[in-house]
Image: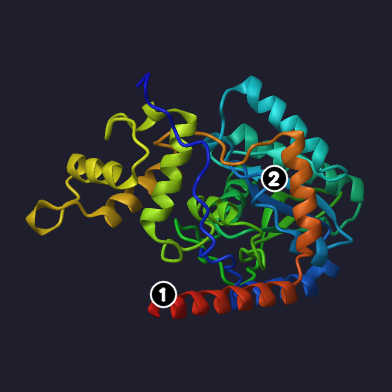
Amino acid sequence: MASFLPRRVFPSLDSLPRSYFLGHHRAGLNRMKTMLTYIDLIIECRDYRVPLTSRNPLFEENLAGRERLIVYTKQDLGSEGRHQDKIRERAIQEWQQPSSVLFSDHKDKSSVRKVLNFARDHTTAKDSLMGSRMMIVGMPNVGKSSLLNALRQVGVHKGKAAQTGAQPGVTRKIGTTVKIIEGDESNEGVYLMDTPGVFVPYVPNAESMLKLALCGSVKDTIIAPTTLADYLLYQMNMYDPKVYAEYSSPTNDIMEFLSAVAQKTGRLQKGGTADVDASALWMIQRWRNGLLGRFMLDHVTESDLERERRDSESLGSSLNHARRADKDMRRERSKQRFLNAG
């Protein structure tokens, strides 16, 4: 262990897809815009493990004019110790001003109550007999539906209202509003509307795409499992190689790592050869569930926050930019195939 040196930089992968902006993402966003008239508060969910990368500028651009609460979900999967967490969370709160920010674990009732208390206070300040109508938005698979179900269960003691799943795209249409806080003599209560996840039109760099894919914001078929597992191995090594000691000795070689996992878990093909794709997907899912270390993929420092601001400004979050970038990438791939064939 003492002689092992992890990679400090992950190899550049310019051929990776940089978009996952699907038809139902565009349709869902357009529908959200038409519903704004009836909405008092936007609850935007982002993944705690990728607080910068899971921000979608499309929401700020298209859903402007409404107060926003930003909830960083899956806090339990990225916690690295309360002292370090508090420093990071304070930096995020300052970065997101004037929007309000909360950090949440939908399995922790006290955490869920903080979101409910914010919604209740917002409704009280609004002082309307009609209560409040709120909309929950976010990138695919950041935990919107899980949070909605938790708010409903803790708030009004009722069961699951929104479907959830390990892969993105479970919620493809805007759902009906569900009550999360009971009404009283002063108002009718608080209702929350579930929405489909909306991906950014274009991801500015390949590593951001890998982070989003590793967290489950794109389907596992979009990026090769071995590529994604290699990025996970890189991140685990940067955090602590001991998190995978049960399966392999420390290594930077993804094939060596996956072969060891396959042997250890019995994921073998005919002849006893390792099924590396199955092993890769299994390891990725283990990490998503918090069973291979709980750590951040985004660094949250002043320089990282400043870089995120610059990236957002240069991105412009325009669909035209996305189309041009995608066309350029396809043209470059065709050129490379032609050159390789020659």
**334 relative position to 135: left or right:** left
| Quarter-of-image position of residue 56 | bottom right
**263 relative position to 258: left or right:** left
x 81%, y 40%: residue: 95
SS at mark 2 in the image: strand
The amino acid type of the residue labelled 2 equals Val
Label 2: few (<14), some (14–19) or many (≥20) C-alpha neighbours in 10 Å: many
User: Residue 159's spot in the image, x, y percent?
Assistant: 52, 52
Q: Which residue is mark 1?
A: 340
As displayed, is residue 242 above or below residue 60? above
Task: Pick the residue in front: 315 or 189.
Answer: 315
Where the C terminus falls, by quadrant? bottom left
User: Residue 1's spot in the image, x, y percent?
Assistant: 35, 22
| Viewer can see residue 189 | no
The amino acid type of the residue labelled 1 equals Asn
| Viewer can see residue 218 | yes
Task: Pick the residue in front: 158 or 6.
Answer: 6
User: Residue 244's spot in the image, x, y percent?
Assistant: 34, 33
Mark before the other along the chain sequence, 2 or 1: 2
x 20%, y 39%: residue: 264
**2 relative position to 135: left or right:** left
Q: Which residue is mark 2?
A: 71
Task: Pick the residue in front: 186 or 7.
Answer: 7
